[in-house]
Amino acid sequence: MLLHRRFLPWLGFPALAVLIAANALRVWAMLALSVHWNMQIMASQSLGAASSGPYRWIRHPNYVAIFLEVAALPLAHTAWLTATVATMAHIALLKRRIAAEEEVLMSDPGYVRQMGGKPRFIPFLV
């Protein structure tokens, strides 16, 4: 608002569609995780690996959804500078978070067997 940017339909509407799709993916991932879903990084070997919903194809669909939300929300308001800075900062944070989470998850042989061969973020891209 401070920069008086006007809404650009060619940017705002696709960004809004990505934002809606990202929210749907995040909810789908949370529902698929069920009792696994947690904000903390923790070992949950006793529960087994979640492999339904989007987890059939990738290991971290929730992070994909959050990444898309962080990028798309400012773009829906034509705030490309905010989208760029927020996305870069988010990448730095997620890089550390995912490395820590993968260390815990990959320490479980059952998880490695079930999920180790799946790509982290993009289906069919190993």
Image: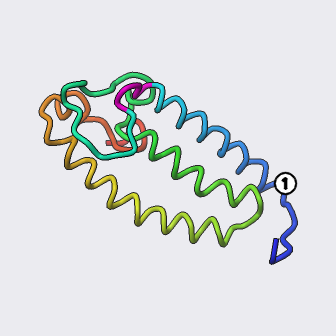
Q: Is residue 72 left or right of residue 88?
A: right
Residue 119 falls inside the magenta stretch: no
Image coordinates for residue 19, horizontal then vertical, percent: 66, 45
- 101 or 41: nearer the viewer: 41
Residue indicated by mark 1: 9
Image point (59%, 50%), residue name: 69
Residue 114 vs 38, above or below: the answer is: above
| Range drawn in magenta | 32-36
Residue 110 vs 87, above or below: the answer is: above
Say which quadrant the C terminus sits in. top left
Res. 94 image quadrant: bottom left
Residue 35 falls inside the magenta stretch: yes
Q: Is most of the magenta stretch helix, strand or loop?
A: helix
- Helix, strand or loop for disc 1: helix
Image point (34%, 46%), residue name: 40
Residue 91 vs 22, above or below: the answer is: below
